[in-house]
Image: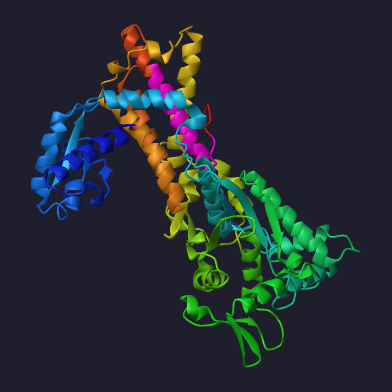
Amino acid sequence: MIRDTLSTAIGAALDAVARDRGLDPSSLAGIGLERPARPEHGDWSSNVAMVAAKSLGTNPRDLATALTERLAEAEIDHVVGVEVAGPGFVNFRLADSWLHDVLAEVVARGQQGYARHDFGAGTRVNVEFVSANPNKPLHAGHGRGACLGDSVARLFERCGFDVTRETYLNDRGVQMQLFAESLAARSRGDEPPDDGYMGDYVVEWAAEMPADADPLEWGYERALRSHRDTLERLGIAFDVWFSERSMVGNGAIDAALADLRQHGVVYEADGAVWLRSTDFGDDKDRVLVKSDGDATYLLPDIAYHRDKFTRAERLVNVWGADHHGYVSRLKAAMQALGHDPDELDIVITQLVDLERDGEQVRMAGRSGDLITIDDLLDEVGADPFRFTYLMQSADSRQTIDLGLITKTSMDNPVFYVQYAHARIASLSAKVAAAGITRLPIDEVDLSRLTHDRELDVLRALYELPDAVELACRDRAPHRITAWTRELATAFHGFYQDCRILGDDVEHEVSQARLWLVEAARIGLVTGLDLLGVSAPDSM
């Protein structure tokens, strides 16, 4: 594509200038290319002169001038002008033909190949998310991690990785026992223990529980069923539901401690067993086994991640804001076991506030002291839920206006994007009803696409492959959400200003625009699928 074409041309020009000055070009820095924010600065820009000037013993602007002279002499596909700008940028102006090539490539690759990468081929990645305790329904706070984790997994798959979606069940310990006691109390008509679970869901589940059931085991299975049903409504399916209890039975926790001892990173003090986590960047050493012989939360987590590393080369955890302080100790433990800390990536999602038309929604619903994901799905639906939760970076606090995302208007970002696809579907139906045949693309003159609105759509389509790569590497699905909004904006503008069908539209122009619409459809479906959001044919 054009980026490769320009990079090759710049590299050749830089090589020639370096050799003219008696220097080895292999020692020069890489070539950077970006799209200028302002159209008057051209279609593409490189800072190569500013990066390489020192090595060539010149100032950036003089080097940019020398490079520009070389580039102007070369015959570079689509390039109609090269110029120096500012302190030493090399700017390229391109003919519209480069965007017509974008259209042809999008169509040729289709939904399966467009914006797909293979840099992850052969690498197994485990994406752990949700990981909620099985003692209550999934609440609104879990929603952000659920949507983020599943979208990150989709991005990894799009980039060629072998992905496992996994959730961890903290199904042992005090909290599970309190949950069981709360169920038992409610089934007798009593109040739960003071430190038990008070939500309305406990009353509902207790009423379902058979009289002869074990409250712990029955409650555990009931909570799991609740989680599975909720996640299914969101279109999320885990490959692995990992039980903490399983590690007690198979000795994995003891094996993890033995492994740490073998690595010489534990010691005993004050009757407890400690991890030398300060040796690996933590702010203090951490207790693994308390003086009473009970393991802390850290040791089972170490055992769990030790197990995951036998099944994948890279781990990604999506955790809530309350786990922020836990990151350094777990990374230290994995490093102590010999793993590269970069092989474990922990994404922390910040809190979400709910409001309706500017008024805060208190975290209360039919579940007592929390609003469940099901509460929100009943009100807004799965598509608005997922799209909205993925509109902002995970590390920023988010406010969701429930009133806005239920509106069927262009003010609603979800409606705005999905309506672009609905318009495409409606147009396709009109084309079919009129008996119009879209010619093969190699028989269509794409150079007829010259309107600014048409070119805006093509520029947006060009950006998706880069957006997918960046979103995958940065664990940032919000980049894709932003891109779908940009493409929708471009398409709505095109749809408004450029007639596609009609006696007043030239046949050649109509055919080119029909292929532009098809490329936009491929882009919207691809982007929305990465978010786990549908592309409806009608709204």
Residue span colored magenta = 514-534
Relative vertical location of residue 463 with respect to residue 355 in this rendering, above or below: above
Q: Main secondary structure of the magenta part?
A: helix
Q: Is residue 526 magenta?
A: yes
Residue at far right of view = 212
Residue 132, how many percent across, how many down? Answer: 64, 61
Q: Nearer the viewer, residue 445 or 225?
A: 445
Comparing 406 with 450, the one in front is: 450
Q: Residue at x 9, y 52 (%)?
A: 58
In the picture as drawn, the residue positioned furthest to the bottom comes out as 270
| Residue 178 shown left or right of residue 325 in the figure | right
Tell me, what colour scheme is on the image? rainbow
Q: Is residue 516 magenta?
A: yes
Quadrant assignment, res 370: bottom right
Residue 208 sits in quarter: bottom right
Tag count: 0
Q: Is residue 384 visible?
A: no
Residue 424 visible to the viewer: yes
The quarter of the picture where residue 31 lies is: top left
Q: Residue at x 40, y 37 (%)?
A: 464
Give whichever of 74, 80 is nearer the camera.
Answer: 74
* Percent coordinates x, y for residue 263 in the rendering: 60, 76
The answer to whether residue 472 is above or below residue 315 is above
Q: Quadrant of the N terminus?
A: top left
Q: Please provide percent x and percent y for residue 112.
A: 52, 31
User: Is residue 365 shown left or right of residue 483?
Assistant: right
Residue at the image point whose x is 17% and y is 54% from the top: 55
Position of 469 with respect to 14 (left or right) is: right
Q: Position of residue 383 (x, y in %)?
A: 54, 41
Q: In front: 263, or 441?
A: 263
The residue lying at 80 percent from left, 71 percent from top is 185
